Amino acid sequence: MKAVFDERQWAHDPKHFMANGTILPNPEQPRRIEVLRAGAEAAGCVFQAPTDAGVGPIAALHSPQYLTFLKNIYKRWQRIDGAGDEVIPNIHPARRTNGYPKSATGQSGFHQADTACPIAKGTWEAAYWSAQSAITGADLIAGGEQGAYVLSRPPGHHAFGDLAGGFCFLNNAAIAAERLRNNGLHPAILDVDVHHGNGTQGIFYDRNDVLTVSIHADPERFYPFFWGYGQEHGEGLGLGYNLNLPLARGTGDEVFLKTLDTALTQVSNFGADVLVVALGLDASIDDPFQGFAVTQDGFAAIGAAISGLKIPVLFVQEGGYLSDTLGVNLTRVLVGYQGAV
């Protein structure tokens, strides 16, 4: 299986993460690259660097105002007397229809949903090449590959069209799906990360040309809290084209795989001729977020079940944080998929 990664993705090295009022080390560490790459290579993946498709495919889904913010905010932040090393908001608009400030502090609150997406010196460069990796992955599929893996880091599924959040800045899976659609294909996105893909849902919520399906921990008591409920089906033209399948904390293999069958049936009924899998591995029983309890065998079964659609699949890396089984779980998904194709 072909795989895509760019070395410039190492440049994003976040230090801080606030949880329950406590400043903690950020779990979205660059070392994830090393572990995930080894896991992909163990599954037979051969990596290549992406080509630079320019900002156009990114701007197809992310607003010019937001991209201007991401490119420039770190330098602007450093001009603030006494500012910290990372851009972390301390204020948010009550409604995002309120005025748009000129202040760097105000704009950070407007464009960063939470304190889990700090922006530092290398963030824009890493996010840009993470997105370009997803674009190249989409082009591989459009060019005839039946499967490909993208090591996108930082991840993307919490990023809306003009809003970062949850370690995410550019929505790699959504950008890849839009690229596939522009190549004449009919894509669906399946998100198996333990956290709801709220940014992906938001981007396509009023559209009927991309189906979005997410299996995740129930947001009543789990991040991202405000999105991911079962009654969210889309709106306008998108009504019926978004499916959320929230599950209880601690869900293991049996229930997860049964729910996956429901998700894959929806993808099939949509008539998708290509699938983008937002591949979070943080559903693992060993993941530090402790949301689900999917085992290594469960991840192999996830890959095998996805192959049953008999359509090309692009795996785009989302979450999955440092543990003894992170790389193994990726290997099991990709081997499970390839072994059943």
Image (spheres, rainbow, N blue to C red):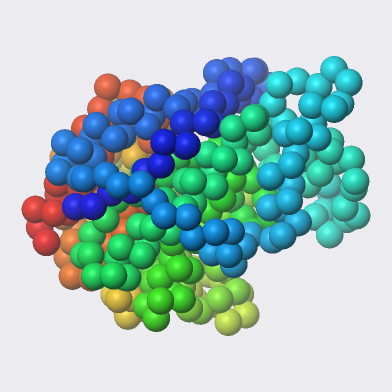
Residue 332 seen in this snapshot = no
In the rendered image, which quarter is residue 18 located in?
Answer: top right
Q: Nearer the viewer, residue 215 or 11?
A: 11
Residue pictured at 21% horizontal, 65% vertical: 146
User: Does 58 sit left or right of 77 as displayed?
Assistant: left
Q: Position of residue 61 (x, y in %)?
A: 60, 64
Residue pictured at 24% horizontal, 70% vertical: 144
In the rendered image, which quarter is residue 20 located in?
Answer: top right
271 vs 47: above or below = below
Residue pictured at 27% horizontal, 22% vertical: 324
Q: Position of residue 215 (x, y in %)?
A: 39, 53
Q: Outermost residue, left direction?
A: 339
Residue pictured at 47% horizontal, 26% vertical: 29
Q: Position of residue 222 (x, y in %)?
A: 53, 39
**Number of numbered discs on residues:** 0
159 vs 112: above or below = below
Q: Nearer the viewer, residue 35 or 307?
A: 35
Q: Indicate the quadrant containing the C terminus: top left, top right, bottom left or bottom right.
A: bottom left
Q: Position of residue 128 (x, y in %)?
A: 54, 47
Residue 136 seen in this snapshot = yes
Q: Nearer the viewer, residue 125 or 246?
A: 125
121 vs 133: above or below = above
In the rendered image, which quarter is residue 199 located in?
Answer: bottom right
User: Does 226 sit left or right of 328 as displayed?
Assistant: right
